[in-house]
């Protein structure tokens, strides 16, 4: 394990199978100083982003090619590729999306006041709040290409029984199942829902 900063890469975990790798010949004997700090940064960056992950990247390319030939990727822009691989990084929806592509059940209907409050609260969320809401309800902070229409299973919203304005919503992320109390106002719903999304311990059935 490296105790001083020299020209070695020392992983924080033992899963890599090595304790230190020289970034240059005899790197363990050369200390990082003000004079050579820039070289150290360049070598460390090259190792972490290129040399050190070369085998993993080759394995990724081989696997990806089995699904979709990489030479065909030139037909897509980098934003399109990102969308296909990672989904929508800035999730967006409107009232029609929520009404059409979520499933109110067990105490809620699309016309019930509690569900209508839910629609308005979701539409008023910022981008970061939407990500937090998705992470809370689905286990992922992004939506698949196509948005809520292509989220499977669809988000199900049910009325949480024996709940009051002081209660918090709970979820079953595996099946996108949100138990939402029928709060008396939008402000209370927004406050409780956002508070729940910020707490890791609320992912409860």
Image (spheres, grey):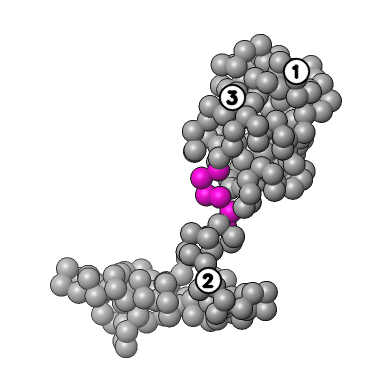
Question: Mark 2: which secondary structure?
Answer: helix
Q: Which of marks 3 and 2 is in front?
A: 2
Q: What stretch is highlighted in magenta?
A: 86-91
- Which residue is identified by label 2? 75
Of all residues, the one furthest to the top in this rendering is 184
Residue 54 position within the rendered picture, expressed as x and y whole percent measured from the top left: 49, 80
Extreme residue in the front direction: 75
Q: Name the residue under label 1.
A: 112
**Where is residue 128 shown, x and y percent of the image?**
49, 38
Q: Which of 34 and 64 is in front in this view?
A: 64
Q: Please state if 194 lies on the left or on the right of 203 as rendered.
A: left
- Chain-order first, disc 3 or disc 1: 1
Residue 194, labelled with which disc?
Answer: none
Q: Describe the element under mark 3 as helix, strand or loop.
A: helix
Which class describes the residues within 10 Å of circle 3: few (<14), some (14-19), or many (20+)? some
In this picture, is 203 found above or below 143? above
Q: Is residue 89 on the magenta stretch?
A: yes
Residue for badge 3: 121
């Amino acid at each position: 394990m490296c105790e001083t900063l020299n020209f070695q890469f020392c992983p924080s975990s033992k899963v890599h199978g090595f304790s230190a790798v020289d970034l240059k010949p005899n790197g363990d004997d050369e200390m990082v100083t003000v004079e050579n700090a820039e070289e150290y940064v360049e070598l460390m960056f090259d190792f972490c982003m290129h040399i050190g992950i070369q085998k993993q990247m080759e394995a990724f390319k081989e696997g990806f090619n089995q699904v979709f030939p990489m030479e065909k990727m030139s037909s897509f822009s980098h934003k399109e590729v990102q969308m296909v691989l990672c989904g929508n990084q800035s999730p967006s929806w409107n009232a029609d999306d929520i009404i059409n592509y979520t499933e109110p059940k067990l105490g809620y209907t699309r016309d019930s006041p509690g569900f209508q409050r839910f629609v308005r609260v979701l539409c008023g969320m910022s981008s970061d709040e939407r990500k937090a809401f998705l992470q809370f309800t689905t286990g992922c902070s992004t939506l698949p290409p196509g948005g809520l229409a292509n989220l499977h299973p669809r988000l199900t919203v049910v009325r949480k029984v024996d709940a009051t304005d002081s209660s918090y919503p709970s979820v079953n992320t595996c099946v996108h199942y949100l138990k939402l109390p029928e709060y008396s106002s939008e402000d209370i719903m927004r406050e409780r829902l956002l508070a729940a999304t910020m707490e890791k311990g609320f992912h409860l059935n």
